[in-house]
Image (cartoon, grey):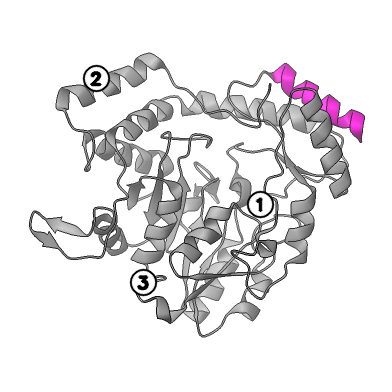
Amino acid sequence: MIPVTKPYFPSREKLNSYIDGIYERQWLTNNGQLVQQLTQRLEDYLGVKNLLLIANGTLALQIAYRALGVSDANRDNKPEAITTPFTFIATASSLKWDGVQPVFTDIDPDTWCLAPNKIEAAITASTRAIVPVHVFGNACDVEAIGEIANRHHLKVIYDASHAFGVNYKGESLLKYGDAATLSFHATKLFHTGEGGAVVFKNKEDLERARRMINFGITGPENIDELGINAKMSELQAAMGLSVLDEMEKNIEARAQIWRTYEEVLPDNLQLQAQHEALSYNHAYFPVVFKSEAQTVRVAATLKKNGILARRYFYPSLDTVAVTAMRSSCSVSQNVASRVLCLPIYFALDIKDAGFIAELIKGVL
């Protein structure tokens, strides 16, 4: 069976060397040596400052909302945040869970990211933030979104779960917005088994978030902030450091699979339009087919041949009862009904990628 993705497993010898250090120090959590090392190495690798490691990507979003004042302990305020329906459920459910109503606006039909020209009509007196998603690692229109946020005095938190290592105009895409969050789930390009991070624009927001992830504790006898336990452990950091040591070969393997799909698949399939100034990380290979029926047919054919593709992201979240509010996003619904992510991961053989592409050609 060929799955849609597989976790990258780094050298066992390398991982063991980091774990040996954990045993020697007898330190498993609470900002240990490996968490500090991974923080510094990720800031250097990504070209960012004010990076905070978190236990998982969903908590990363929630910590960002709370640190930036988008959500708070007073649930009677009924704050809102404008976001995209074409995303993983955690983008919206993390808002709702924290007392913020997600308000969906539609996406661009080519980039599949939040369409800036749809945002302002959805802004109300309750709107506190815009939460766009760099979908499949593609850059949102960060300049236009930034201008809208400045005009209306709104915070911008980018869900950058897919954008690890992506540069835009020569700099990290994670530098845009008041914060950008990352997921380090096992299936991500870079992972710590489970984990995540927030990159803050301002150091004071980082420091507040740092207190929040440790229950609000600021000293042995001081609790100065409403907090939660969202710390990354040393074992997670050990996995992350091992994966980071081998990032280049991981990315290059995915790039070869990407190029194989691009060369073999027919030209009449819709691929995501990426900004010219973007350096892509080849984390995903999404395809949009002519119709939902064709998408379902392709997925069924692949499954019969032991290949699992994924309708990712489906359904469009404006159709999901637990998150939807006064919105219907026709472009998102249309793209979501026709999208399929093809298998792409380090261990996938190039010949298998070519076989997958040929199977798809046979269905069309």
For disc 3, the neighbor class at 10 Å (few under 14, some 14 to 19, many from 20) is some
Mark 1 lies on a secondary structure that is: loop
Q: Residue extending furthest left?
A: 221
Query: Residue at (22%, 42%) from the top-left corner?
Result: 31
The residue stretch that appears in magenta = 350-364
Which kind of residue does numbered mark 3 sit on?
Asp
Task: Find disc 3 in the rendering and name its residue.
Answer: 72
Q: Secondary structure of the magenta portion, mostly?
A: helix
Task: Find disc 2 in the rendering and name its residue.
Answer: 20
Spot occupied by residue 320 in the image (x, y as percentages of width and height):
66, 61
- For the N terminus, the quadrant is top right
The answer to whether 31 is drawn above or below residue 325 in the figure is above
Q: Nearer the viewer, residue 166 or 308?
A: 308
Spot occupied by residue 159 in the image (x, y as percentages of width and height):
51, 55
Spot occupied by residue 307 in the image (x, y as percentages of width and height):
73, 26
Give how far apart the Cα atoms at labels 1 and 3 are: 35 Å
Q: Point out the tag, 1 or 3, that comes first from the N-terminus.
A: 3
The answer to whether 359 is drawn above or below residue 274 in the figure is above
Task: Find disc 1 in the rendering and name its residue.
Answer: 275
Which kind of residue does numbered mark 2 sit on?
Asp
